[in-house]
Image (spheres, helix red, strand yellow):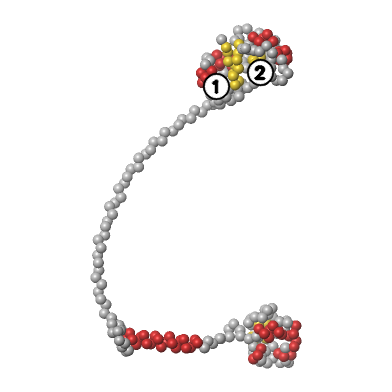
């Protein structure tokens, strides 16, 4: 790139492609360079062959090398003619309006036309009546009272949970291979005591059979024969459950050691006394 090529504002900076802002600083005055000359010499390694580059002292840039910069005025041939036409047309219209030139059919145009009064039409305005306040009836929405029960501190009667004081009883589900002899030995009771407190106990114990077992005693006299029941409704009271089973609620509370305000939990087991 020629070292004398630069933009108008900074001779040390040049645009690396043919641009109208590129100038030759080895000419006097500094002049814009044509795209063709930039492409052939200024922006290539051929700048050393440029006649301007090889001249000893700055001189005017030859006309054939000069370009048109952004601030170079570009005269348009049609612009003066257009301006003249507009001025003439405006003068003609003004002469007609002032009456200096009369044309047939345009007599009604005048420089100072008289204004014709425009009647004013009054339209009656309709006043809207003030809004009437309406009362919105209050809709009474009945609310449902939900019964909330508070669990007592007594542990739920799940399987193998001791029930009562003396004798203590548990409700047990037989595991595979268990027998009456094994259960009697495990819970320190007797087969006779087990059979004495169970209603319709089978002769041979089978898997998953649920039975009642006394704990650490063989003395079960005075106890009824029990059936067992698993609770399936959460939060039901002892009285409601007894009514469903058609059993006296007092006897359920007595043999299961439950207070009056006790609510049952799903998965609990109850001792149901049989007459």
Residue 194 location (% of width, % of height) = 66, 11
Can residue 154 be spotted in the picture?
Answer: no
**212 above or below 95?**
above
The residue lying at 30 percent from left, 84 percent from top is: 106
Q: Residue at the location (27% across, 52% down)?
A: 129
Q: Residues within 10 Å of mark 1 (few under 14, many from 20)?
A: many
Badge 1 is on which residue?
262
Displayed quadrant of residue 30: bottom right
**SS state under label 2:** loop
Q: Are marks 2 and 1 in contact (CB under 8 Å)?
A: no
> What is the spatial separation of the Cα atoms under label 2 and label 1, in whole angstroms?
27 Å
Q: Is residue 211 visible?
A: yes
Check the picture and name the quadrant holding the C terminus. Answer: top right
Where residue 135 appears, x then y in whole percent? Answer: 33, 43
The image position of residue 204, as x and y in percent, is 69, 13
Q: Position of residue 213 (x, y in %)?
A: 66, 14
* In the image, residue 175 above or below residue 32: above
Asked if residue 156 lies left or right of residue 125, the reply is right
x 60%, y 11%: residue: 225
Residue 177, located in which quarter of the rendered image? top right
Q: Earlier in the sequence, mark 2 or mark 1?
A: 2
Quarter holding residue 210:
top right
From the image, state whether disc 2 or disc 1 is nearer to you.
Answer: 2
Give above or below for 134 relative to 224.
below
Q: Residues within 10 Å of mark 2 (few under 14, many from 20)?
A: few
The quadrant of the image that shows the N terminus is bottom right
The residue that label 2 is drawn on is 209
Residue at the spot x=58%, y=13% of the render? 273
- Vertical arrangement, residue 91 with respect to residue 16, above or below: below
Secondary element type, mark 1: loop
In front: 113, or 92?
92
């Amino acid at each position: 790139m020629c070292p004398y090529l630069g933009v108008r504002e900074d001779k040390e900076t040049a645009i690396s492609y043919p641009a109208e802002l590129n100038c030759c600083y080895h000419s006097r005055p500094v002049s814009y360079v044509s795209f063709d000359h930039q492409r052939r010499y200024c922006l290539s390694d051929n700048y050393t062959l440029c006649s301007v580059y090889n001249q000893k002292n700055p001189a005017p840039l030859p006309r054939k090398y000069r370009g048109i910069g952004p601030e170079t005025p570009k005269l348009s041939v049609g612009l003066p003619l257009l301006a003249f036409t507009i001025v003439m047309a405006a003068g003609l219209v003004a002469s007609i309006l002032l009456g200096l030139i009369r044309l047939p059919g345009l007599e009604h145009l005048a420089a100072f036309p008289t204004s014709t009064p425009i009647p004013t039409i009054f339209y009656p305005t309709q006043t809207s009546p003030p809004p009437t306040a309406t009362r919105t009836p209050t809709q009474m929405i009945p609310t449902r009272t939900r019964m909330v029960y508070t669990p007592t501190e007594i542990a739920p009667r799940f399987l193998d949970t001791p029930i009562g004081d003396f004798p203590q009883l548990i409700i047990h589900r037989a595991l595979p291979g268990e027998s009456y002899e094994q259960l009697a030995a495990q819970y320190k009771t007797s087969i006779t005591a087990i059979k004495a407190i169970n209603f319709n106990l089978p002769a041979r114990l089978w898997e998953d059979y649920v039975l009642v077992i006394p704990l650490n005693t063989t003395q079960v006299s005075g106890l009824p024969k029990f059936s067992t029941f698993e609770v399936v409704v959460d939060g039901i009271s002892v009285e409601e459950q007894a009514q469903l089973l058609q059993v006296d609620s007092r006897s359920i509370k007595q043999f299961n050691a439950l207070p009056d305000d006790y609510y049952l939990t799903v998965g609990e087991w109850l001792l149901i006394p049989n007459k």
